[in-house]
Amino acid sequence: MSGNAMTPSPNKVVGLVVHGGRPTACEAATAAARQLAETGAQVVGVRGDAWSDASAELREPGAFGAGLDVAVVIGGDGTFLRAAYLVRDQGVPLLGVNLGRLGFLSEIEVMDIPAMVQRVVAGDYQVEERMTLSVEVRDEHGGLIGHSWALNEASIERTVPQRLIVLEVLVGERTFASLPTDAVVCATPTGSTAYAFSARGPILSPLVDAIVVVPVAPHSLFDRTIVVDPNETVTVRPVDGDNACVVSTDGRESLPVPNGGSVRVLRGESPVRMARLVPFDFYGRVRQKFGLR
């Protein structure tokens, strides 16, 4: 889903989320911060990102998103996912800057930063919304004991590498299958090109609303993906005795699943918003990423 550009204002507040471990990202962030400040924009950075500039106000991660008009992400897809967790709940659109490793979430190249600055401060961009997942961990009595969300995927996975785990998958209230497997991945269309793809899941257009359920290395005759409506709830629970597992959201946070407990995955309450300077060519990006001819 996409929407109109934000209304121009004389003083934009622009956040920068930076992969501080890469010198090229820090250099690009410093240049962007100074160019933004020259336009009169207020520049905000994340404390702990290992870069700073006199033109930027540094905030703690929990306070970063407040009052931002847009956040520019300088790094790879991992940095973009971290930025999404910082600003989703404030509805701040994200604009990704690619640093040479082609990803699926970046929008522009480093060389395009000067032109990007002018368009951002003018409010000259469209906003695209990407579906997210809400992830609940429940105990054996159905009580909620943990909650998170994901832009790419929720992965229910074993904690003992030497052992298989048996996971029962339910769609709605009906059991679909019990799978001896390494993990079960529940992915959004955005996440269909990430972990789910490496487990031989399908590629979904980001225009599709769906949840992809992919078994990882199943020891079963059934090794196929299922695609469910996002208004259906997917429940995954360990069965057959000692099946210790966790649920990982975008590789960022792991929540333990208790004995007799379960993980419920459903459409997220809020989307992640992405700022687009030009229409996103998803199929062209797939061709580039995988070297298709």
Image (tube, helix red, strand yellow):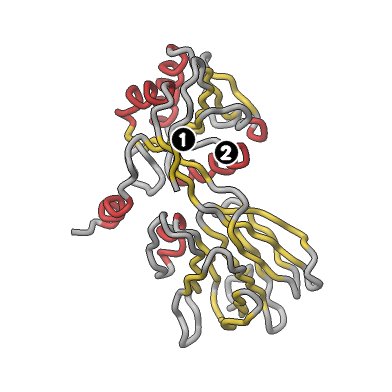
Amino acid type for the residue under numbered disc 2? Gly
Q: Earlier in the sequence, mark 2 or mark 1?
A: 1
Residue at 41 percent across and 55 percent down: it is 207
Q: Foreground residue, 225 or 291?
A: 225
Residue at 33 percent across and 42 percent down: it is 279
Element type at marker 2? loop
Where does residue 32 sit, x and y in percent of width and height?
42, 22
Amino acid type for the residue under numbered disc 1? Val
Place residue 238 in its image quadrant: bottom right
State the residue position of label 1: 73
With 227 as the anchor, is 167 left or right in this view?
A: right
Place residue 156 in its image quadrant: bottom right
In this picture, is 37 found above or below 173? above
Which of the two marks, 2 or 1, is nearer to us in this view? 2
Place residue 154 in its image quadrant: bottom right
Check residue 267 in the rendering and tell me which mark sits there, or answer none. none
With 23 as the anchor, is 12 left or right in this view?
A: right
Please say if the residues under marks 2 and 1 sit with CB atoms less than 8 Å apart: no
Q: Foreground residue, 235 or 8?
A: 8
In this picture, is 45 found above or below 180? above
Where does residue 55 sit, x and y in percent of width and height?
51, 15
Residue at 30 percent across and 50 percent down: it is 285
Residue at 62 percent across and 52 percent down: it is 269
Q: Quadrant of the C terminus?
A: bottom left
State the residue position of label 2: 91
